[in-house]
Amino acid sequence: MTTTTNLADFGFREIKMARDLLDAWIASGLPSDFSDAGVTIMMNSNSGNVFLTNEEFEVAMESEGKLYSFYNSPYEGKEGSFEDLLAEYADMHAEDQEWFKELAERLSREDELPADEEE
């Protein structure tokens, strides 16, 4: 993945996306689990996605005027919002499921996880 923080490398589409990120930050703040240490705007040159990142390498993206955290599972590298990953939970590797359970607990969203199946 090639990324840049140099705004001169952004096209007009990406500059608008950066503006949308800043507007969402002003309107709604950062996601609750996103650290405000060293926040910068970054673009993935391969995908054209523009996002916020920080010293912790966390990622926040914008949708419908709000910022949300974008996650990457540690075992299989599944990517997406909490809702995206929740939809994939049943198909996740056991190690990713454990990571996602911990994430859900940190976000106080563990009640959204599917019930454990009993044999």
Image (tube, rainbow, N blue to C red):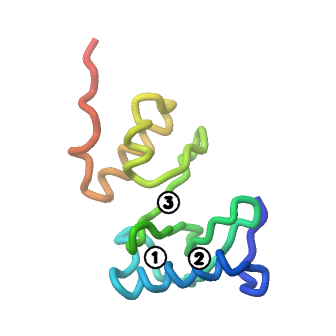
Q: Residue at x 54, y 84 (%)?
A: 19
Please provide percent x and percent y for residue 66.
Answer: 38, 72
Please provide percent x and percent y for residue 21.
Answer: 50, 79
**Residue located beneath label 1 in the image:** 35
| Kind of residue at disc 1 | Ser
**Left or right of residue 3: residue 32:** left
* Label 2 crowd bin: few (<14), some (14–19), many (20+), radius 10 Å: few
User: Could you say whether the residue bearing mark 1 is in a helix, strand or loop?
Assistant: loop
Please provide percent x and percent y for residue 109.
Answer: 26, 52
Please provide percent x and percent y for residue 23.
Answer: 44, 85
**Residue located beneath label 2 in the image:** 55
Cα distance between the residues tagged 2 and 3: 15 Å
**Left or right of residue 44: residue 40:** left
Between discs 2 and 3, the one toward the N terminus: 2
* Label 1 crowd bin: few (<14), some (14–19), many (20+), radius 10 Å: some
Residue 78 higher or lower than 41, as above or below: above
**Residue located beneath label 3 in the image:** 70
Q: CB under 8 Å between callouts 2 and 1?
A: yes
Which labelled disc corresponds to residue 74? none
Q: CB under 8 Å between callouts 2 and 3?
A: no
Q: Residue at x 73, y 79 (%)?
A: 10
Dot in front, 3 or 1: 3
Residue 52 higher or lower than 8, as above or below: above
Cα distance between the residues tagged 3 and 1: 13 Å
* Label 3 crowd bin: few (<14), some (14–19), many (20+), radius 10 Å: many
| Kind of residue at disc 2 | Glu
